[in-house]
Image (tube, rainbow, N blue to C red):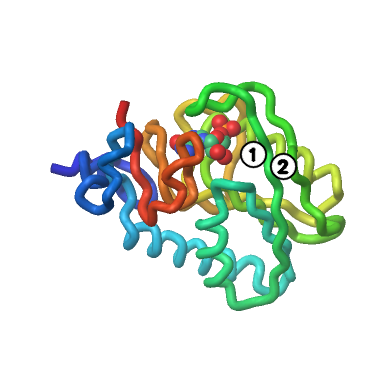
Amino acid sequence: MPVDIAEPEGKALILPGTICKAYNLCMAKEDLSLVYDRDMIDARVATLATEITREYKNLNPILISVLKGSVIFFSDLIRRLDFGIELDFIRLASYGPHTKTSGEVNIIYDVTLDIEGRHVLLVEDIIDTGLTVKKALDHLNKRGPASIKLCVLIDKPWQRLTPVEAAYTGFTAPDRFLVGYGLDYAERYRNLPEIYALEK
Ligand code: 5GP
């Protein structure tokens, strides 16, 4: 039986063991439970694209993907935007255990476009403590964009260490470690089309 978890947007499914039925990944060391299936993800991405279109249609924005985790979400999202945009990428690294962000976050790949005076939408996979996205926003804000907002696929607001708010949120997720749809565990599982929780 799926366990219902109340959330503002989209309801998380927790379907233990689904991964072994759907994919030949039984060799994986970890057990995975399905949390968001393809239909749920597609529906949320479509809704976010509609909201973003409403706000940015005439602003020729720069959309910046935070590497690597947001790339699948980013590519699905931008293909639903039928107005002029420019793309860029930023990559940050945090040093700590596999499933937690440490206090130290560094920029290891920077945007190449000039964002001064431009409307910027930063697209991130997950906000957990908020430290990663705060570092990216502070860094980009120094370049003088006309505006900068955040679009996040998954918000996990349970362990925030710094206050950050997304203008656009796909799902508010349970406090679990998630993989798939771009999200990794030690670089694995990024290519799964759905989002799963890693079981201990
Ligand atoms: P924060 O700095 O907000 O704690 O964490 C943000 C980054 O940590 C995300 O960009 C993501 O790379 C990673 N992260 C946080 N929670 C998860 C999770 O549940 N699964 C995965 N795969 N990465 C996560």
CB within 8 Å, label 2 to label 1: yes
What residue is shown at x 73% (from left), y 62% (from top)? 62
Residue 57: quarter of image: bottom right
Residue at mark 1? 133
Q: Amino acid at mark 1?
A: Val
Image coords of residue 194 (percent x, y): 36, 53
Q: Residues within 10 Å of mark 2 (few under 14, many from 20)?
A: some
Residue at mark 2? 137
Q: Within 8 Å of ligand 1, the CB of disc 1?
A: yes
Image coords of residue 7 (percent x, y): 35, 43
Q: Amino acid at mark 2?
A: Leu
Front one among 172 and 34: 34
Image coords of residue 200 (percent x, y): 31, 26
What residue is shown at x 38% (from left), y 51% (from top)? 9
Count up the numbered dots: 2
> Considering the numbered disc 1 on the image, is that residue within a helix, a strand or a loop?
helix
Whole-number angstrom distance, CA of label 2 to CA of label 1? 6 Å
- Position of residue 23 in the picture relative to residue 162 (left or right): left
What residue is shown at x 52% (from left), y 42% (from top)? 126
Locate the N terminus and report the quarter of the image it occupies: top left
What residue is shown at x 23% (from left), y 45% (from top)? 20
